[in-house]
Amino acid sequence: MGILDASMVFFLPLGIDFVVILMTARKPEWFWLYALLATVGSLIGAAGTFWAGKKAGEKGLSRFVNPKRLARVKARVNRGTFVVAGLAVIPPPFPFTPFVLASGALGMNAWSFFTALAAVRLFRFGVEGALAHRYGTQIGRWMKTPTFQAVVGLFIALAVIGTIVSAVMLIRGSRRRSDAVAKGGRDPAVGLE
């Protein structure tokens, strides 16, 4: 789930956060393991996004990130690794994926980026797990209510719709790039390496 949560296509706001909380509420003694696994999964998913950004380069970045948002994303990424990693603490609906993508496209040092990201994600998931460990019985009771089931249904619907929209946008971007290359133009996703 952590891998999908940090990818460019899958969309589920607070998905991995809820998984950490719910799993910890069921088995509180394993809260540290859930936080660790969520961090590792998130890093693997972010690595795929970072690599896609690196391949696209700065010129191809506009294919993945809304041009209106791109200037702000670039400004924050250019401020350094710790600024971008600090953004990883903020839970969704804050859109973190464009920052990972831009970090790869703008040539941020991968080791420093992923080291900082790992520390921040482990902190975030660790705090969530510790709180779920402390309040697990109340969470367990809440999970049995109709309200919880309605919230889960809403998040599933959001995940399906968001994933479809993300996939369509990615496919459209790929087709535009393929059409440009087929017409003899330069591939807009290829950056300077």
Image: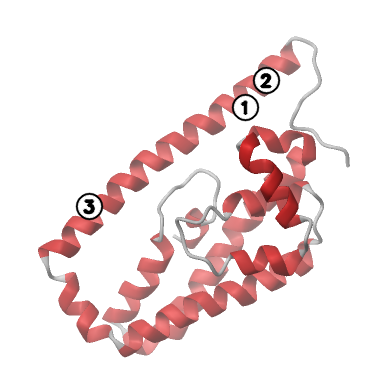
The residue type indicated by label 3 comes to Gly
Considering only vertical position in the picture, is 13 above or below 140?
above
Q: Relative to residue 29, is residue 36 drawn left or right? A: right
The residue type indicated by label 2 comes to Ser
Q: CA distance from mark 2 to mark 3?
A: 37 Å
Whether residue 10 is visible here, answered yes or no, is yes
Q: Quadrant of the C terminus?
A: top right
Q: Relative to residue 95, is residue 30 drawn left or right? A: left
As helix, strand or loop, the secondary structure at mark 2 comes to helix
Residue 122 placed where, x, y %?
Answer: 56, 77
Residue extending farthest top: 183
Q: CA distance from mark 1 to mark 2?
A: 6 Å
Considering only vertical position in the picture, is 44 above or below 57?
below
- Disc 2 designates what residue? 178
Residue 93 placed where, x, y %?
Answer: 45, 55
Which residue does the image show at 68% across and 44% down from the upper left? 52
The residue type indicated by label 1 comes to Ser
- Disc 1 designates what residue? 174
- Disc 3 designates what residue? 153
Q: Residues within 10 Å of mark 2 (few under 14, many from 20)?
A: some
Q: Are marks 1 and 2 in contact (CB under 8 Å)?
A: yes
Q: Which mark is residue 21?
A: none
Q: Relative to residue 61, is residue 135 drawn left or right? A: left
